[in-house]
Image (cartoon, rainbow, N blue to C red):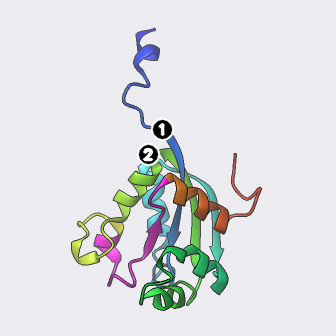
Amino acid sequence: MLAGKYSTLGAMPTERTFAMIKPDGVRRGLTAEILRRIELKGYRTVGLKLYQIPRETAESHYGEHSAKPFFGELVDFITSGPVVAIALEGENAIAGWRSMMGATNPANAAPGTIRGDFATSVGENVTHGSDSPESAQRELALFFAEGELLK
């Protein structure tokens, strides 16, 4: 009885988030290692696909950066090869996945994080993750059609 009463204390909410292995990660053969880390962390993969991002989708994905000088480079890079689009589910999945990725600049990413272990530059930093519940919902809808995610 006591275990049931206190089993949810401190538990974080179950969330869904969008994760991506970018073209450099796919090209370098890091997909299996990154998926292994996701599974070892305990997140559930509820959507997964190898995907060549159309330019229009990439422009929408990076829309908040459209006025910035590096926007074209972002779009060119993300459309330069296939990506692995991943829908993750788990407790505190948004912040947890971002922590697993490490800092955007690999020079600042801690060893043991994906970017700390594998990224070569700010522009080619292997992974992407939604930064908020709102962006997770928007990005999941952008990369997965209705019915493509497990219930």
Crowding near pointer 1: few (<14 within 10 Å), some, many (20+)? Answer: few
- Dividing the picture into quadrants, the one containing residue 134 is bottom right
Closest to the observer: 127 or 138? Answer: 138
Q: Main secondary structure of the magenta part?
A: loop
Residue 79 counted in the magenta span: no
Q: Quarter holding the C terminus?
A: top right
Quick one: which residue is furthest to the top in this view?
Answer: 1
Residue visible at 63% across and 81% down in the picture: 53
Q: Is residue 54 visible?
A: no
Amino acid of disc 1? Pro
Spot occupied by residue 44 in the image (x, y as percentages of width and height): 55, 49
Position above or below: 142 against 68:
above
Q: Compared with residue 15, is residue 109 higher up or lower down, i.e. above or below?
A: below
Q: Amino acid at mark 2?
A: Asn
Let me know if residue 147 appears in the view: yes
Report the residue marked by disc 2.
92
129 relative position to 82: left or right: left
Callout 2: 10 Å neighbours few (<14), some, many (20+)?
Answer: some
Q: Position of residue 104 (x, y in %)?
A: 33, 72
Coordinates of residue 73 in the picture (x, y in percent): 46, 91
Q: Dot 2: what SS?
A: loop
SS category of the residue bearing label 1: loop
Which mark, residue 26?
Answer: none
- Which residues make up the magenta segment? 115-132
Per the image, the residue denoted by label 1 is 13
Tell whether label 2 touches label 1 (CB within 8 Å): yes
Q: CA distance from mark 1 to mark 2?
A: 6 Å
